[in-house]
Image (tube, coloured by chain):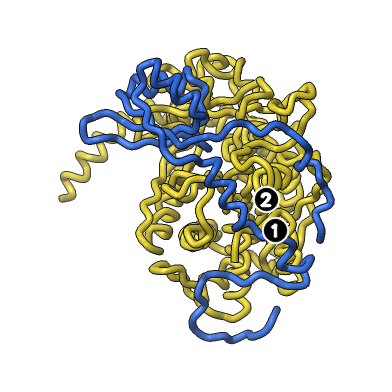
């Protein structure tokens, strides 16, 4: 065994779809890379006549981060093999029962897109190992040093960093408009086929509610937001509000990115459960934290145009009817970008244990039979017509009203409740 | 399935080797390194807090750049030549197509103990 090359990644997906036709489906992505490669994803799940809660896992955005595609292929293979055999799935000290694997396959649509940037991967595997970006030369002006776009700065989340972020925000983390930079964000949001393919998956599979972008290295598991510190109180202080342009990306200032308190609690809990599963394998201490921060250094790392924030943001911009809880994994620690294959095998087991746990966390509390599922779609359609998100959504006037009332009422009610509780004791 | 493109093999100048380097300093010093040097910090910066209160940040830089940083007063320790590691590791990337265009399916690394109720392929 050794690392998969870019041909083998696609062949592996085709092989799995052929071997397990009842529980997997090959997805051919429509946008060809600059070098003419076509990529595939694999949808895993039996379905029950209607779309199940979707989990999208992508890897390989940064070419030099070897092993991400191998993690995804192995994860898909293990799920399919364990379900078919009716067996448990064990990674070192972390074990999942056959019933848990069955739940994932039968109650989720897991979409695995292992190598979104095959041109970059091919270049890293064969020519220049430390290559990060894709291989699009459109902005290079014929200069080989200026080829490529950082795919993970090309998504439509605060992409125009010069307008959206404060001048004091770290320019070496946000993005760059210099094609020679490793952070070059392209000529427009979604200018690149690699990010277009990810967007296409969201459009084709609107049931996607969970997302993970797999990178290396560091042993981190990151949750949104990545542009500024999270805050749970001021709803109109958010990425859609142009009034806050030029003020984002700096810690301990006026701006903080709004996140609903329940959402924040949920993403933290899921992140903690995922790193616990990873640690259970052989004790690797992955850390879960908000992606804006660099906790070990006490510093910040604001980003624009990243896949996780864009995925999470879609609900708030009205481009998705379901909220996507989005995360970024930085696998491996001291092994760097190029672990040996014997070093990579235990990393694969670590991360795949985390991925299985992540899927279990994504399981809906209940699964509807097919006819109720269609009834639900009909009901939601009516609901969204009667209660449009721009009025009743998290940034709408209703939420502002609710927050204002809450700010007044809760300080009044809280002492009353405490007094009442004391009397009860 | 055969990779038909040779685009990536065109004759391009390969940048000089990069080394994993460790810069140690105060929080303020490392904040300045992050904001002003334009160094390669990997996918995202990583560092460690040292017992004396200083921190160490990992970066990727050429020998020349490391020398410049040292000359500018930064405490920089040169580590592994990561470009050389990458070149060496190329021998561990698959050659050809072990899955024969999808006629062979991969096998997973996870253990699958317990009942094998369904058997065979689904």
> Gap in Å between the C-alphas at discs 1 and 2?
7 Å
Which chain did the image draw in yellow? A
Residue drawn 41% across and 41% down? A289
SS label for mark 1: helix
**Chain of the residue displaying label 2:** A
Chain B, colour shown: blue
Residue B120, compared with residue A102, is above or below; it is: below
Q: Please report whichever mark, 1 or 2, sits nearer to the chain's N-terminal start.
A: 1
Residue drawn 60% across and 43% down? A64
Circles 1, 2 touching at the beta carbon (< 8 Å)? yes
| Left or right: A30, with B35 as reference point | right
**Chain of the residue displaying label 1:** A
**Residue closest to the eye, A221 or A145:** A145
Q: Position of residue A81 (x, y in %)?
A: 61, 74
Q: Residues within 10 Å of mark 1 (few under 14, many from 20)?
A: many
**Residue closest to the eye, A377 or A358:** A358
Q: Can you see residue A400?
A: no
Residue drawn 22% across and 42% down? A420
Residue B11, compared with residue A369, is above or below; it is: above
Q: Position of residue A187 (x, y in %)?
A: 74, 24
The numbered dot on residue A115 is 2
| Left or right: A331, with B7 as reference point | left
SS label for mark 2: loop
Name the quadrant containing residue A71: bottom right
Residue behind mark 1: A9
Do marks 1 and 2 share a chain? yes
Number of marks drawn: 2
Q: Quadrant of the N terminus of chain A?
A: bottom right
Q: Position of residue B49 (x, y in %)?
A: 29, 35
Q: Position of residue A207 (x, y in %)?
A: 67, 52
| Left or right: A205, with A253 as reference point | right
The numbered dot on residue A122 is none
């Amino acid at each position: 065994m050794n690392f998969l090359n870019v041909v083998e990644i696609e062949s592996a997906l085709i092989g799995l779809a052929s071997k397990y036709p009842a529980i997997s489906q090959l997805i051919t992505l429509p946008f060809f890379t600059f070098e003419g490669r076509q990529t595939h994803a694999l949808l895993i799940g039996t379905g029950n006549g209607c779309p199940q809660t979707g989990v999208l896992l992508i890897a390989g955005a940064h070419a030099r981060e070897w092993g991400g595609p191998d993690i995804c292929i192995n994860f898909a293979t293990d799920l399919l093999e364990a379900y078919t055999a009716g067996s448990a799935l064990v990674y070192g000290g972390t074990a999942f029962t056959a019933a848990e694997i069955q739940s994932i396959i039968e109650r989720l649509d897991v979409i695995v897109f292992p190598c979104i940037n095959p041109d970059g991967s091919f270049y890293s595997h064969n020519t220049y190992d430390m290559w990060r970006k894709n291989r699009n030369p459109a902005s290079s002006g014929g200069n080989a040093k200026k080829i490529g776009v950082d795919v993970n700065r090309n998504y439509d989340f605060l992409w125009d960093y010069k307008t959206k972020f404060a001048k004091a925000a770290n320019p070496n983390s946000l993005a760059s408009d210099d094609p020679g930079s490793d952070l070059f964000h392209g000529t427009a949001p979604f200018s690149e086929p690699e990010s277009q393919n990810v967007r296409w998956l969201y459009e084709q599979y609107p049931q996607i509610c969970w997302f993970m972008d797999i990178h290396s290295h560091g042993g981190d598991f990151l949750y949104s937001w990545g542009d500024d510190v999270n805050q749970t109180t001021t709803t109109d202080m958010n990425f859609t509000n142009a009034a806050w342009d030029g003020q984002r990306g700096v810690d301990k200032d006026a701006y903080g990115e709004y996140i609903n308190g329940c959402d924040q609690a949920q993403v933290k809990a899921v992140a903690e459960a995922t790193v616990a599963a990873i640690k259970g394998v052989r004790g690797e201490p992955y850390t879960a934290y908000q992606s804006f921060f660099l906790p070990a250094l006490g510093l910040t790392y604001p980003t624009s145009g990243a896949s996780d924030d864009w995925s999470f943001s879609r609900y708030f911009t009205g481009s998705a009817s379901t909220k996507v809880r989005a995360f970024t994994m930085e696998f491996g620690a001291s092994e760097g970008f190029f672990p040996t294959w014997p070093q990579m095998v235990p990393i694969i087991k670590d991360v795949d244990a985390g991925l299985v746990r992540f899927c279990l966390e994504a399981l809906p509390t209940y699964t509807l039979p097919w006819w109720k599922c269609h009834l639900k779609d009909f009901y939601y359609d009516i609901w969204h017509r009667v209660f449009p998100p721009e009025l009743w959504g998290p940034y709408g006037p209703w939420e502002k009203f609710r927050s204002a009332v809450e700010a007044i009422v809760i300080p009044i009610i809280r002492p009353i409740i405490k007094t009442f509780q004391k009397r009860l004791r | 399935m055969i990779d038909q493109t040779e685009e990536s093999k065109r004759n391009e100048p390969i940048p000089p080797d990069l080394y994993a380097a460790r810069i140690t300093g105060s929080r303020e010093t490392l904040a300045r390194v992050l904001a002003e040097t334009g160094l390669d910090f990997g996918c995202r910066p990583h560092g460690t807090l040292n017992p004396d209160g200083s921190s160490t940040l990992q970066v990727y830089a050429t020998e020349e750049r490391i020398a410049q940083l040292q000359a500018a007063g930064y405490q920089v320790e040169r580590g592994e030549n990561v470009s050389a590691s990458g070149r060496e590791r190329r021998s561990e990337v698959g050659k050809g197509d072990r899955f024969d265009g999808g006629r062979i399916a991969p096998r997973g690394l996870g253990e699958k103990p317990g009942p094998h109720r369904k058997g065979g392929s689904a």
